[in-house]
Image (cartoon, rainbow, N blue to C red):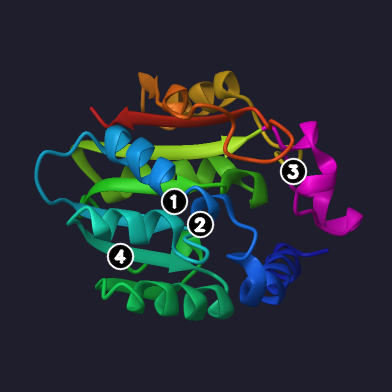
């Protein structure tokens, strides 16, 4: 399977899930807790320029906008973007949503203060490339916020792909905080700080080990 075909299959998977995705999503069921954790991870005392990569139905983007930040959010799935726009309209939030692959983000280098990637790395054929994109988009002193989990702990609760797709995704089973910290360091973010301790318990069914990390671009 060519990379182009793999990406098309991944996009189709999420487009099919988009209409019902928020009905079972952690960021909806535990909205206030996610808001508290992300607000802490952002470490922002004033409005900032936020870019949300792989935004899905707008989990990070909508929270960031509700905190007063200017937000640009991107996803490869038109259906996810449509659902995100509807979710942002309901509370009257102004978020700039666009359809784009992470590798083709129409945003200038050093144009963001915060870049978010929530539950994105496990879906990618080249997760390190996404972290390098975050590094490129951030200004010096800017902050990346990455959240993901070890999804193989609770396979019956997770989204998954067809075997031929899963085999091409190096983090399909998820990842640990330690591995994520190593990846961040390799991408140019030498020191990461965890925020998942602010959740009273795992925000996902099956007690999936989850992390929320922030790291600053030197």
Query: Which residue is tagged 3?
Result: 172
Q: What is the distance, in whole Å, between disc 4 and disc 3 at their CAs?
A: 26 Å
User: Percent position (x, y) of residue 61?
Assistant: 36, 59
Task: Check the picture and name the quadrant holding the C terminus.
Answer: top left
Q: What is the distance, in whole Å, between disc 2 and disc 3 at their CAs?
A: 23 Å
Residue drawn at x 46%, y 42% is: 131
Asked if the magenta segment contains residue 126, the reply would be: no
Please tell me whether mark 2 sits on a helix, a strand or a loop.
helix
Tag 4 near tag 3, CB within 8 Å: no
Question: Range of the magenta residues?
Answer: 150-170
Q: What is the distance, in whole Å, between disc 3 and disc 1 at their CAs?
A: 25 Å
| Apparent side of residue 217 relative to residue 90 in the rendered image (left or right) | left
Tag 2 near tag 3, CB within 8 Å: no
Q: What is the distance, in whole Å, between disc 1 and disc 4 at their CAs?
A: 20 Å
| Apparent side of residue 122 relative to residue 107 in the rendered image (left or right) | right
Q: Nearer the viewer, mark 2 or mark 3?
A: 2
Marked residue nearer the N-terminal end (1 or 4): 1
Residue drawn at x 62%, y 35% is: 149
Marked residue nearer the N-terminal end (2 or 3): 2
Marked residue nearer the N-terminal end (2 or 4): 2
Please tell me whether mark 4 sits on a helix, a strand or a loop.
strand
Query: Which residue is tagged 2?
Result: 28
Q: What is the distance, in whole Å, between disc 2 and disc 4 at their CAs?
A: 20 Å
Tag 1 near tag 4, CB within 8 Å: no
Asked if the magenta segment contains residue 158, the reply would be: yes
> Can residue 188 be seen by looking at this rendering?
no
Residue drawn at x 17%, y 39% is: 44
Query: Which residue is tagged 1?
Result: 31
Please tell me whether mark 3 sits on a helix, a strand or a loop.
loop
Query: Which residue is tagged 4?
Result: 72
> Can residue 102 be seen by looking at this rendering?
yes
């Amino acid at each position: 399977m060519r990379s182009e075909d793999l990406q098309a299959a991944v996009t189709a998977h999420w487009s099919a899930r988009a209409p019902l995705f928020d009905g079972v999503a952690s960021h909806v069921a535990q909205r206030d807790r996610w808001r508290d954790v992300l607000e802490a991870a952002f470490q922002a005392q004033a409005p900032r320029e936020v870019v949300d990569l792989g935004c899905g139905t707008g989990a990070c983007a909508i929270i960031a906008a509700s905190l007063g930040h200017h937000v640009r959010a991107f996803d490869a799935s038109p259906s996810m973007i449509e659902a995100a726009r509807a979710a942002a309209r309901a509370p009257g939030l102004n978020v700039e949503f666009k359809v784009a692959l992470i590798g083709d983000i129409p945003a200038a280098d050093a144009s963001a203060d915060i870049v978010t990637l929530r539950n994105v790395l496990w879906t990618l054929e080249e997760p390190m490339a996404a972290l390098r994109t975050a590094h490129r988009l951030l200004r010096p002193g800017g902050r990346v916020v990455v959240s993901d989990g070890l999804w193989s702990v609770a396979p019956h609760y997770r989204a998954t792909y067809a075997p031929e797709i899963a085999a091409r995704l190096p983090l399909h089973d998820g990842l640990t905080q330690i591995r994520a910290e190593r990846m961040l360091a390799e991408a140019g973010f030498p020191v990461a700080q965890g925020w998942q301790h602010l959740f009273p318990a795992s925000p996902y069914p099956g007690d999936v080990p989850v992390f929320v990390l922030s790291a600053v671009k030197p």
